[in-house]
Amino acid sequence: MLKNIKIGVFISLVNILIQGVTLLFQNIIANNLGIVNFGHFGVLQTDYTIFCAIADFGMMTLILAYFGKRASEGSLFTNVLQLRLFMTLLSGIAMIAFACLFRRNQPTFGGELILVAGLLFQHAFFDWYFICGHFWKKLLISKVLHTLSFTGVMTLCLYVFHFDSIPLIALATVLAALPAFSFGVSQAFSFKIFRIRYQTFKFFKLMLKSACPFAATSIASFAYLPVGLYTVSHVAPPEFLGAYNFSHRLMTLASSLMVYFIYSSVLTLHKSKQGQLSLRDQAIFTAFIIAISSPLWLFPSWTLKIIFFASPWTPDILQISSQCLQILSFSLLFQAIRLGMISTLLKEKKTILYGIMISIGGLLNIAICSIGARYVAPNLIPVLTLSGDFFLTLFLGCYFIKNRRLSW
């Protein structure tokens, strides 16, 4: 478990470079847009993240679980890159259709269309190549490059030109990703991707079929934390949506970093023949997550004011956001408890079982949030949002207990 933590911390740290800077500039975005439009911007970011997951279609997890380092070499690498480009194109078409059908008369419509380009030119497009190939230095270079680029572009756009509309800020984020994307192209691009053969389509068919459980788990995960943001956007006042978005941004960052611990755990499990899940190792990791996340629930208002130091806080907005952050932070506890169970199922390729569990948990979360939000005050919606985490953790725990897969 200590090795898992070390690898996970490294991958998380190189990603937190850009995540931290992004969070820093959320201050200025909130200040330029105002509380209400900042809430709408949060909805746009969530929409974009979901379509990024559709473009990935669970391929990152599939490649790690099935191929590992082999995916960064030879014809397999070429086929994987072709597939990811193909899925990005399909996801872009789907995002345009979604924007025209559901965001046409909303403040996010222009930003939705602009961020379609961001599906391809995203800084993390080649992360799978660096992680699978164990090219840790290149991964670090990519993140540092994007951090510098993002800082320069956003400083110019937000400070100098004072971008104060959702479409303009969306455009700035796309431009900021171009240098890191170009670095990825220089390291992982091959003209062989233009060689489309019959075997290419066979590979696509095989991978898409195999990836369905991974895709289901990836997309179903957005029925957990993001469903709270969507629920708030429909039933709560605009000011509450803006306040909620601050806590939601922090939790989205923390949850995205947890994914890298899953990746590191899967990589480590591939080198181990142990079939039992160690409760001691799991307890150590859970205690580690509780320790580093403690400011979120012990000092939520201080945490928010420190991280979002330039945001236009008012006492009411800060109080609402602090309450939401305290509640939502318990999601990290649930995620830590089930990390070892998830990585074990992925390593053993029991993705259909895990996909069923996470899908049922996501559906229950949607149902509870949709129905419960009609009968509770808006400040209790974060509690409803945690229902999916609770049920998924319960399902996984029952499975491992029933099959006697736990040991001390």
Image (cartoon, grey):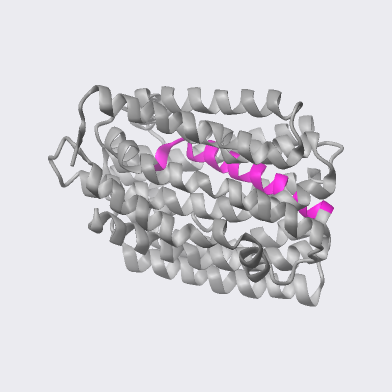
Residue at the image position 73 percent from the left and 71 percent from the top: 310
Residue 59 is a magenta residue? yes
201 or 69: nearer the viewer: 69
* Res 98 quadrant in image: top right
Q: Position of residue 220 (x, y in %)?
A: 52, 31
- Against 257, residue 277 (above or below) is above
Q: Which residues are magenta?
A: 36-60
- Against 220, residue 65 (above or below) is below
Q: Position of residue 90 (x, y in %)?
A: 58, 34
Res 201 visible: no
Residue at the image position 58 percent from the left and 46 percent from the top: 328
Residue at the image position 39 percent from the left and 24 percent from the top: 209
Res 253 visible: yes
Q: Position of residue 270 (x, y in %)?
A: 20, 44
161 or 253: nearer the viewer: 253
Q: Quadrant of the C terminus?
A: top left
- Against 90, residue 168 (above or below) is below
Residue at the image position 31 percent from the left and 35 percent from the top: 346
